[in-house]
Amino acid sequence: MVLKGSSKTQRAEIPRKAIYRLSLYLRCLHRLKDNGIQTVSSDALAQAAGVKPTQLRKDLTYFGQFGRRGLGYEVDQLAQMIIDLLGTASLQPVVLVGVGNLGAALLSYKGFDKEGFEIVSAFDQLPELARKKKVRQPIHGMDKLAEIVEKHAVKMAIISVPAEEAQEVANDLVEVGITGILNFAPVVLQVPDEVMVNNVNLAMELENLSYFIQS
Amino acid sequence: MVLKGSSKTQRAEIPRKAIYRLSLYLRCLHRLKDNGIQTVSSDALAQAAGVKPTQLRKDLTYFGQFGRRGLGYEVDQLAQMIIDLLGTASLQPVVLVGVGNLGAALLSYKGFDKEGFEIVSAFDQLPELARKKKVRQPIHGMDKLAEIVEKHAVKMAIISVPAEEAQEVANDLVEVGITGILNFAPVVLQVPDEVMVNNVNLAMELENLSYFIQS
DNA sequence: AAATGTGAAGTTGTTCACAGCT
DNA sequence: AGCTGTGAACAACTTCACATTT
């Protein structure tokens, strides 16, 4: 688990972790659908997601009633409701800042598109150099940030610059109206309350494993 | 946050999240040290880490008493105790399976070394193809896994293969004695209880942001 | 009979209030 | 006086038990 972001506690009553599990359920539902399965019980779906059936049901009731007693849930319908809820029903535009090794890998990652996100553009201090990495998205200098964010109505950004530059980049992003940041830099970003930050820190994940595997 | 791994609840009473925060504190302590600061109060350190001072103090008391009342904590000493606790005092060997875009990026990531991890070797179904990516670590076929894991006494592994292959790779890793897995594939891995899995799912992180930024 | 939905109980994690050192 | 350490209160989340619907 990545240590979860900062800020914004609106839509209270609903546990933060429940939202994560929604994503998890969605992935399992996709797989069920691929296998031609149309109906699923909370027991079966929970097992696929690695949670307890009661937790799955409780998670869903935060948002309404979607099952039929004695029968289970309709795969398609439940998937669609989660998609609507997460706000990924329409393709969400995202920008990425920092086209180093990791940034370039993220730009090539097919998983985003599949889940309803499109990295519309990347930015780097040295765009010429970064362009050598041959990714399909256009790479701009930071001077183009405002223009492109506005043009595509972008609200989310990925930060994959070195630690020292991350806060400055975050400031720039906030300035042009970004409200959701996925941060790969190993620093605690300071942002206004209305901006949401999720951190992914690879070294921290390994350290965490390291602790738990000690005999 | 990434939805945190499975299995293993030993060393009870200590909250899982407290271990993550230890990593966070360590990072902040490193920065303080770089700035030549020798002593820090729970207030200051907590602020740097983005947590409440009482939480920091409580987290530390799970492991002992490290501060001096009226004075604060000694930066060096506290950092060392966290390093010892996390088990990264000596360089930890790690293997990586799946040298695609993401895998290659992880192999080139400098952050691991700095935090006490060394990716000693990488594995891929098609090692010849993968070697074109020009990373500094040797790339082997899966047939060499057991040999190298034993030779370096490796206990931790990173999975960066496509979703369909992840479970099979996990089985192989468990078989050769790996007990900690950092999994980037978007699937819920089934492993024995004594094996710890931490999941990093990039699409899930974006979906989570997407939910929270909806006005 | 089978499976969902949910208030209530239980568990885990966080914060408070203040006692205790230096 | 300043700041840590910690039991007790509080809040958040999970699980249970069972009423309810098909």
Image (spheres, coloured by chain):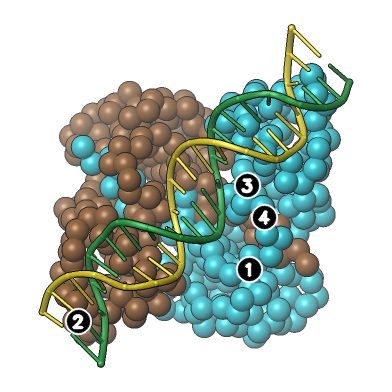
Chain colours: A cyan, B brown, C yellow, D green
Which image quarter holds the C terminus of chain A? top left
Whether marks 3 and 4 lie on the same chain: yes
Q: Is A87 or D7 nearer to us in this picture? A: D7
Helix, strand or loop at label 1? It is: loop
Q: Which residue is mark 1?
A: A8
Left or right of A152 in this view: A128? left
Whether marks 3 and 2 lie on the same chain: no
Q: Is B79 or A34 nearer to us in this picture? A: B79
Amino acid type of the residue that numbered disc 4 sits on in the rendered structure: Glu
Tags 3 and 1 touching, CB below 8 Å: no
Image disc number at residue A13: 4
Tell which tag, 3 or 4, sits nearer the viewer.
Answer: 4
Q: Which residue is mark 3?
A: A18
The crowd level at tag 4 (other Cα within 10 Å; few <14, some 14-19, many 20+) is few
Tell which tag, 1 or 2, sits nearer the viewer.
Answer: 2
Tell which tag, 3 or 2, sits nearer the viewer.
Answer: 2
Whether marks 1 and 2 lie on the same chain: no
Tags 1 and 2 touching, CB below 8 Å: no
| Quarter of the image where one finds residue C22 | bottom left
First along the sequence among labels 3 and 4: 4
Image disc number at residue B45: none
Residue A116's spot in the image, x, y percent? 74, 51
Helix, strand or loop at label 4? It is: loop
